[in-house]
Amino acid sequence: MLHLRLLFPLLFLVLPVQAETLREAAGGKLLIGCAIATRDLDDPELTNLITQQFNCITPEYEMMPEKLVDDHGKFTFDTADRVVGFAEKNKMPVIGHMLVWHFITRKWLFESPDGKPLPREKALENLKTYIDTVVGHYKGRIKAWDVVNEAISDKDGEYLKDTPALRAIGPDYIEKAFQFAQAADPQAALYYNDYNIEQPGKLDRTLKLIHSLREKGVKIDAVGIQGHWLLDWPPAGMIGKGVEALSAAGVKVMITEMDIDPLPRDSSGADMSQSEKGANPYPETLPSEMQEKLAKRYGEIVSELVRHPAVTMIGFWGTHDGRSWLNDYPVKSRTNHPLLFDRKLQPKPALDAVIKALALPKEGRSPNRPSP
Ligand code: G3I
């Protein structure tokens, strides 16, 4: 493409030229994120891909409570510092992921050694100490924090998941976490992050949480729809309606962990308590007809997302298929192909589909998108 631009410069002045990277296509109007891990930083080919294609970083695992603090309350920031350092060197904002998540935590935060819930005041003290230490360590360096992850129940009729924090502190553990985070770094944006919240039922429970926090004057800047979707679920229109409903509640909306699973499975999302037995239909590569289906689905969803001014970020959960958590979920050890680059870091048809969708002509894009 470059040689053509040299030979026929005038041509490229008059013809629209398709962006060659995700971040170019987003044109500064959207953050295009990816989840990375410290181990990715030792692969120069991969770090080149990350800096060329993306403009925002989420540490995939390095900032989880299990990784930052041990069973005795000793904090270690080395691996997370490496990811943040890489992002800063490449002028890429970082989303701190996350402060509170029942699935990956340290028991002592909310439970006594015998597994019983700690007294409320002690649990609150531990939560505040944890957030003060972590958010304080990165004060001024982290654009935003996923303050609470996956607290809303998947079950109709149940509002919040039954977690150690809920049992020890009560439902206001969520607002307390947001208040502690704001006090520790008033400049950082604060997010709630969850899966399937674009879908009826869980969407309503999430709206209840957002309204409840905002009515109490709690700072919540955005909601992260994780975006762990399937080839045929949820419909793009449902995603769009979910974005509109969340935005109408007064928050920005981000797609924080997008991947589209081309393999057969029962449900979308990321309920880590679920596992399935399933086939491993494409152990080597994804056949071209499946590549096309994946590309069409990515294009359809991203075209829908860019129509909504509230969407300020589209983040992908991983950089290439070999690094996807979906190689192990919900079916253990199968070869998955959910992302935009294959295991050899080569672009898949889905990349072109997303670039085209991001660079939708003016009429396809929303005006006055808020800053990311
Ligand atoms: O780093 C250790 C390694 O030293 C050790 O040898 C190995 C085996 O025990 O574990 C490695 O840590 C694993 C880590 O991923 C890095 O690979 C953890 O055990 C494992 O639990 C962790 O899984 C992460 C998972 O969250 C749970 O923390 C996945 O990488 C990550 O993709 C996944 O991401 C979550 C989001 O945070 C929230 N939304 C859902 C999404 C998918 O579950």
Image (tube, rainbow, N blue to C red):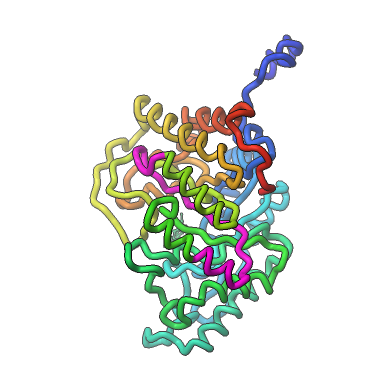
Q: Is residue 79 visible?
A: no
Total marks shown come to 0
User: Residue 178: which quarter of the image?
Assistant: bottom right
Can residue 229 be found in the magenta stretch? yes
Q: Is residue 151 visible?
A: yes
182 vs 113, left or right, is right
Residue 42: horizontal and vertical position, in percent? 59, 48
Is residue 216 in the magenta section? Answer: yes
**Quadrant location, the N terminus:** top right
Q: Nearer the viewer, residue 371 or 317?
A: 371
**What segment is highlighted magenta in the picture?**
209-235
Residue in front for this viewpoint, 277 or 220? 220
| Above or below 15: residue 236 | below
Residue lying at 71% horizontally and 11% vertically, measured from the top left: 11
Figure quadrant of residue 279: top left
The percent position of residue 237, horizontal first and vertical second, equals 43, 39
Q: Position of residue 161 (x, y in %)?
A: 39, 69
Answer above or below: position of 240 versus 58: above
Ligand 1 in which quarter: bottom left
Examine the rendered structure and indicate whether residue 122 appears above or below residue 204.
below
Q: Give left or right: position of 53 versus 203.
A: right
- Is 76 rendered above or below residue 275? below
The residue at the point 37 percent across, 73 percent down is 162
Q: Give percent across and percent down for residue 210.
A: 53, 63
Of residues 294 and 83, the one nearer the viewer is 294
What is the quadrant of residue 292 in the picture? Answer: top left
Q: Residue at x 38, y 44 (%)?
A: 234
Q: Residue at x 53, y 88 (%)?
A: 121
